Amino acid sequence: MAREILIPHQDIVARVEALAKEISADYNGKEPILIGILNGVVFFFADLVMKMTIPCKIDFVRAASYGSRTTSSGTVNFIKDVEIPVQEQDLLIVEDIVDTGLTLEQIVKSLKEKNPASIRICALIDKKERREQAVAIDYRGFEVEEGFLVGYGLDYDERYRYLPDIYVLK
Ligand code: IMP
Ligand code: MG
């Protein structure tokens, strides 16, 4: 499939470092648990965590909703839950891209049931086009109006994840 570069790797790196600085300042004196949503988040997550200037813990959840299609099914199945106890802890959910918002809504709901001290959301890309569920994104890397994006962990049917830049599929 044809693709067009949208966000070069160097721009991603700069933005991720700025996000890590902002998050580190906001959580100063605390030790948040950063929870990555697998699989798309892996590169963003690693880059973000390594730029943190305060101590933090990491864990992951995995939700399946997309398969080989480019629109959300609207239902989320959890394949993997957090393993670190999150009760009374400060949680920062880290997501690659928010589209309809349905995945994040389900994940926030399930984590809230574990009674954490706080929950905030960090998303590399906020894609407005198909938002169905309002989500309060506390830390946002980039805002994108539309299109299907791949690269830097983002896939289309498991392809293109390895690319260092972010592209829009044509
Ligand atoms: P939502 O539930 O519609 O917000 O879907 C969010 C999830 O769908 C993200 O975690 C991504 O895995 C996937 N997704 C949404 N838009 C894109 C895209 O443009 N490229 C790749 N994956 C996407
Ligand atoms: Mg994802």
Image (cartoon, grey):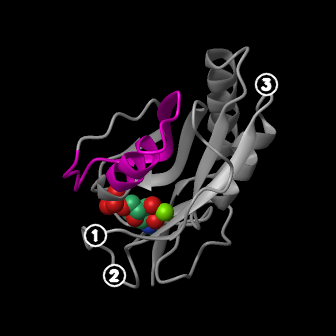
The foreground one among 41 and 33 is 33
Residue at image x 61%, y 17%? 26
Residue at image x 33%, y 81%? 69
Q: Is mark 2 within 8 Å of ligand 1?
A: no
Q: Is residue 96 left or right of residue 126?
A: right
Q: Which residues are magenta?
A: 104-133
Q: Secondary structure at mark 1?
A: loop
> Is tag 2's residue or tag 3's residue first in the polypeptide sequence?
3
Q: Secondary structure at mark 2?
A: loop
Q: Residues within 10 Å of mark 2 (few under 14, many from 20)?
A: few
User: In which image quadrant can residue 43 be found?
Assistant: bottom right
Where residue 136 sits in the image (x, y, percent)?
34, 33
Q: Which mark is residue 69?
A: 2
Are dots 1 and 3 in contact, CB under 8 Å? no
> Is tag 2's residue or tag 1's residue first in the polypeptide sequence?
2
Q: Which mark is residue 54?
A: 3
Q: Read off the residue under disc 1.
A: 75
| Three-letter residue code for mark 1 | Thr
The foreground one among 59 and 95 is 59
Of circles 2 and 3, the one toward us is: 3
Residue at image x 48%, y 33%? 119
